[in-house]
Amino acid sequence: MTIKNRRELLFIYDVKNANPNGDPADENKPRIDEETGLNIVTDVRLKRTVRDQFFNFMGYNGKEDKDIFVRTTDSEKGGIKDGKARARDFGSLKKDMMEDILKKCIDIRLFGGVIPMDKDSIIFTGPVQFKMGKSLHKVQVKYIKGTGAFAGKEGANQQTFREEYILPYSLICFHGIINENAAKETRLTDEDIEELKKAMWEGTKNLISRSKFEHSPQMLIEVKYKEENFFIGELDKYISFDSDLPDEKIRDISDGILNLNELKKIVEFNKDKIESVELKQNNRVKFEGFELSEGLNYRKV
């Protein structure tokens, strides 16, 4: 059954000695807001984490009517399929294609998408939208240079050099909204939302490539509303990471405390419009200010 309640999500994770989201237009350096010194991570990066988790570990791999649409698939002509060829995996008639994609593809039900066709396109507005993620503190970019294993060309005596940019530490917060109105179009269900939350948490842990190692989920908060078309908005503005260290010297989640006092105030101010609040945390996280009062359906998971 399609979801009935609007929701907001806060997802906080950290990164050590890695590049959370490189900018290909700037030597693949970590994305930094030059005015604030904060690390930026695109919503596309988070969605890729979710899709990879769905495909690799949660059975959304084209079998048993469970799939993701946005993934690399082999073409019968050699190479990989373009968008139109991928769409034809789900039928040749527009109506049948739409039905099959929404039935099978959880990423379209969650994030929407443009389904290219020969004459026009099918456009689904995603019920789940995330803002750019930002670090809760200023970060410091480190440049690393090392030698590679091979020469630049056959017969040369000099090995190639390897260059990269990393962040010693970044504690990143994403804010998202789940729109129950758009969910009617993509047929998003409560079960899909539970799968999304699982994929965000476990998918972040499973980023174990060389450039993404040491990603750790730290906290996930879901606020579910009961008043139609209402949401608080900008929940990320109500949290902070308090540390005695200068921002650029923070190296671990234990170097400070997540301050949720302002979040608690705004949630309790709107408690008559809230159906439930759910919080999941890593055991290493220290936080204050979120033991909610009676009258709110609040639970830790």
Image (cartoon, rainbow, N blue to C red):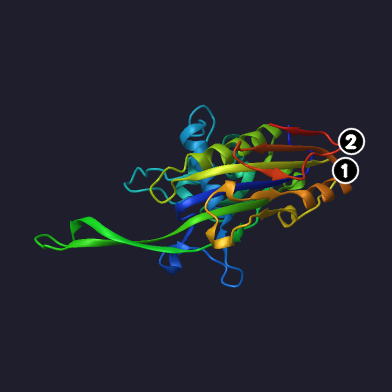
Marks 1 and 2: in contact by CB < 8 Å?
yes
Tell me the residue that label 2 is attached to: 295
Mark 1 element type: helix
Left or right of 143 on screen, residue 161: left
Q: Total marks drawn?
A: 2
Is residue 67 visible from the viewing direction of this image?
A: yes
Q: Residue at x 68, y 31 (%)?
A: 301
Give the image location of residue 178, x and y in percent: 71, 46
Q: Is residue 92 visible?
A: no
Mark 2 lies on a secondary structure that is: loop
**Which of the 4 image quarters holds residue 238?**
bottom right
Residue plotted at (53% across, 59% down): 249
* 299 sits left or right of 19 in the view: right
Q: Position of residue 263 (x, y in %)?
A: 78, 50
Q: Position of residue 286 (x, y in %)?
A: 65, 43
- The N terminus lies in quadrant: top right
Along the line of sight, which residue is nearer the eye, 293 or 295?
293
In the foreground, 208 or 75:
208
Q: Amino acid at mark 2?
A: Gly
Q: Earlier in the sequence, mark 2 or mark 1?
A: 1
Question: Callout 2: 10 Å neighbours few (<14), some, many (20+)?
Answer: few
Q: Which residue is mark 1?
A: 271
Amino acid residing under circle 1: Lys
The vertical placement of 60 against 92, above or below, is above
